[in-house]
Image (cartoon, rainbow, N blue to C red):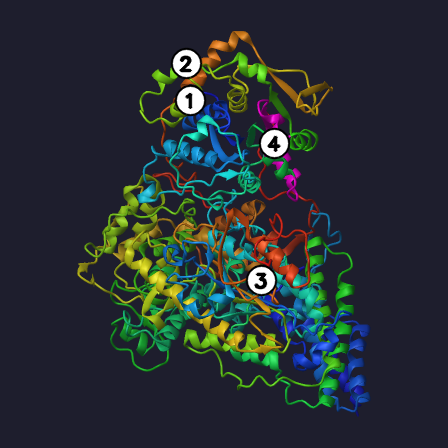
Amino acid sequence: MKTDATCAQTIISRLARRAYRRPVSAAEVASVVKLLALAKANGDGPEQGIQVAIQAILVSPNFLYRVERDPDPKDAARIHRVTDLELAARLSYFLWSSLPDEELLNSAEKGHLHEPAVLDAQVKRMLQDKRSAALVDNFAGQWLELRNLDSVKPDPDKFLVWGPQLKNAMQTETRMFVEYIMRENRPLSELLTARYTFLNERLAQFYDIPGVTGPEFRKVDLTTDQRGGILTQASVLTVSSYPTRTSPTIRGKYILNNILGTPPPPPPPDVPALDASKVGSEVSLRKQLEEHRNNAVCASCHSRMDVLGFGLENYNGIGRWRAVDGRFPIDSAGTLPGGKTFASPAEMKTVLLGNMPEIARCVSEKMMIYALGRGLQPFDRPVVNQINADWKAQDYPFQTLIYEVVRSLPFQERRGETVSSKSIKAKETALR
Amino acid sequence: MIVTRKALARRTFLRGAGAAVALPFLDSMVPALATAATTLKPPVRMAFVYVPNGVDLRNWSLGYEGNLDKMSRILQPLEPYKRDINVLGNLTHNAGRALLDGPGDHGRCSASYLTGIQPRKTMSNIKAGVSFDQIVGKHVGAGTSFNSLEVGLEDARQAGDCDSGYSCAYTNNLAWRAESQPLPPTLNPRALFERLFGEDAAMTPEARRSRNLYRRSVLDLVSDDAKRLAQDLGPTDQRKLDEYLSSIREIELQLARADKDSIRIDPGFDKPYGIPADFAEHFSLMTNMLTVAFQSNLTRVATFLVTREGTSRAYREIGIPDGHHPLTHHRGQEELMEKVSRINVYHVQQFAGWLGKLKAIQEGDSNLLDNSMIVYGAGLADGNKHSHEDLPTVMAGRGGGHFQTGRSIVYRKETPMCNMFLTMMDRMGVPTEHFGDSSGPLEGLDLS
Amino acid sequence: MQAAEKPPVGLVYDANLGQTIDSVLALALLHGFAGKQQCRIASLTINYPDLRAAHLCDAVERFYASATGPGLGGFVPAAAPIGIAEGHKAAPDLPILAKPWESKIKKWNDTAIPELLIRNALMAQYDGDAVMVLSGPATNLASLLKLTDILPLLSAKVRVLVISGVGFNADIPAARRVLAEWPTPIVCCSPEIGEQLPFPGASIDSAFSYNAAHPIAAAYRAAHEMPYDAPGAAMAAMLYAIRPNDGYFTTSEPGAFSISSDGAVQLQALAGGPHRWLKADPAQRERISKIYVEMASAKPVAPPPRRLPPQLQQEQKPPAKPVGR
């Protein structure tokens, strides 16, 4: 018959092992168990004791911090493999945004996790597990800026249909879409060009797509060119607009930043203002923005950025299709520097597809950053190159990226820190 | 060592775990504060109310020096309090300027506003400086429940690129406890209420004593855990653990204070339900609580980040559907400048409301406003040009009866705002020789 | 294609503008070189506490800025503040300053605290990218030295401090302090050198005639009865500061300066010392004279158009950059 003490011992060691993501020593367990004795001495029951013990475990740095050790923490030259337990945590926080489950922990404890076959098998298992929805939520949420949907405030006078239901529906669409691409291991290009999406009645109405009833989401095949791929999804179109109107510049910047991975440099320091000659409401937004490109300095960036945004002008500030903006018909044609032209959003997507290697590289870099929890450095470049070469060879199935990242050197190895006081700014030589 | 993505939220959790046990009312507290030269004077308090994106200078500037007479359009709501304020001109934050780092004035101006240091241009390894309110809070916090309070009205993420490569941590925080540790503002009035007046208000002293006993044991245990972990770490990880240990220490200090006292404060109003939809109501709730917090000596230092720097919040409350930030880049268009002015007026109206509440509280033979230094300021002057000189600044209150108020004072150009901070630190009893880019205390405020 | 020139140096000029015409001519010289992108004006400060000197400076600055039209899309940059030592000295009436100079500066708080203006300007320079020129007393520089943590900043940013010997002895304690504590090399132009290299007064009526209201010409005429050749120690200092390698001047053996109680500056020879005298080669006199006139009378020039962002070319796609510096 188990005594209270043994019971407590079991509960605490099990909990601590899961929370600290590693085996716990008898001494560690004993120090937590002491809290139960304290509670008893204080005249409180065992439940109170367990509560305090749980508090201690959850506030301990062993839980709050992911601990990874170096044999020589101040030697940046010494690169070494992380332990299997450390690898397990990296893996579970990458794919599940949570701590390792029992199976993963066991595999790590036995010391097999780093073996390629075992590692691949775990990745496969974890991707299939429903917890991998966290990867979509957190990665796509940040990469595609979907989290901003919670803080954008489209003007209710301009956008009468905006409301929490529509907003949630938009978010769900993109989330389910990316999740589908991930789970079904669809090619990366489908992110841009899929001929299907996920809708409920509310959103389908918004998109003018007939035949969808009920609040549940389901996969819907698309029959027109108006929708297809993330750039035509209302979530993306809303987070890249102002509260009262679209902004081709912001949308162009969104594409450059998040899809092509060629972010424009920041604007010049003294904030180039558009000409004081009031362009006002006499001409369309597109015409007004053309002022950007009359000035050679502004044009160097805006000729690319704005034009990409023009390609999406058919979608208003919350992503609804439109053929006119107020008095002005939408002109979504454009010519990129380099000569490629398009006359509609669908054509623009085709043009973008011509840059698949850039797009793949962009997504791979962002996935690496997400997985590693740090920015990329020049020394990561060969790794990224290798990943992209392998990925391209298979024509970019989505899951391959995840496997490649897990197999990569930066994911499996680490090193200490250089302890020098280099200044951040590059110093120019002083002396003549 | 890798910090989990939610580390910042957990740090907040740790702070919240500290007991928010109230102290007795000020009068009976005075003997504990009194020094040998007992004068029974209420302590001096300080607060900052920060507005982003600059102001419309045409309608802010008074255009004269000397005794306050006709108020400008934006300062008009302060008319009833003009005997209690000083409007200061030509205060400058050089640390907000580019200084070789290119664009990013919003990120720089808010991160340097109370720290006087140009932040590192990064989205990951953030580094600013310690803000002076925290220095003051550490020194004067011993007699209060909280070293300082940070409040705000706008929900905003803490990571990512918020301005040309400057992290959102820079634009969305005002106070910095350590150079890499901003103090995010509390946004929810309910959370603030619970923190100040105790979710455990209904606890018996016995229950509270028990709870503090357990907390102390937990803290001992995790402290040991941290010390064990701290052996043999690289410098960054070492710093992280140091931050962890200082959080522990702070909670221990709070518990120590809590043990001494047993009376709780009744703020005189109910716990708010949540975040109100209306801006003015939200502002009012927060300042009501700050007022009680000052009055009851729960804290002496507060910062209020009204909305985050660079915000695109629309002010539909006053019929403006456009985002604030895009409006301030008006390119000289009259219609947009007018809207900016209206937003500026709206903000000052809320501020004036708070001054009224502070003034209404008697303290000895003066009032709470007199005993405070409440600064209303913007991190940028001209929001269109991103200028960092002649920052719009109003200081309300007499700092404990020391300042001569009711004036427009224009300093020489390039006078560092950090000079004003030195003067404020001195008034708070933390005389300091140098802070940020200061060149000495700000002259001309005192009663001669 | 000429060898890559170093980027133009940032020049910090602290002068007793209006006390002598020499310091005003040096300012004109500075603008001339800046107009040809051979230097940038980092900051302007006045070490002589007479607000009229700020009026003069402001008038000169607005003259040179008149060539600058509205910038990108109508954006007009604000005029840089002018720093001036405070002291409200009751000054002897100076002929240049007796002239009314039209200026927006009305009060002391329309001007900047000089040592702070200099410090803030230096913080915006890359390391080793600034040169300082002093004409007149070292009052502002001594105040600068009192600021917290100023020495590392000066060491890092300033290549050399070039002093005109004229007027340096008007504030002996400040001069002593600077000579003792200044952390960078110092080159000093003695008044004698200034007299050997005067400004040719005859050029005022010819080279400056393109503008009937040219403030430099007006100041020159106001300073003394025409015709005269103004001694140019400040100009020599300015020329050396901006073009040290063009062979106009040489420098003496190294040493350490000191100033006696009657204001005489002496150089104590010291191997590896940080201070030198400026020396004029008589053979260079005509060449120097010419460059004085050419630069001082140069027409106001609009600043060059901003360089294009380095990454973006019209036709070429920029390479994907590694993320997260």
Mark 2: give few (<14), some (14-19) or many (20+) Cα within 10 Å: few
Q: Which mark is residue C227?
A: 2
Residue type at tag 3: Phe
Q: Nearer the viewer, residue C15 or B145?
A: C15
Left or right of residue B182, residue B139 in this image: right
Answer above or below: position of A111 versus B208. above
Q: Which element is circle 3 on?
A: loop
Q: Which element is circle 1 on?
A: helix
- Comparing labels 2 and 4, the label whose residue is closer to the camera: 2
Disc 1: which residue: C220
Q: CA distance from mark 3 to mark 2?
A: 58 Å
Q: Which residues are magenta?
A: C146-171
**Chain of the residue on which disc 2 is drawn:** C
Disc 3: which residue: B403
**Chain of the residue on which disc 4 is drawn:** C
Q: Are marks 3 and 4 in contact (CB under 8 Å)?
A: no
Mark 1: give few (<14), some (14-19) or many (20+) Cα within 10 Å: many
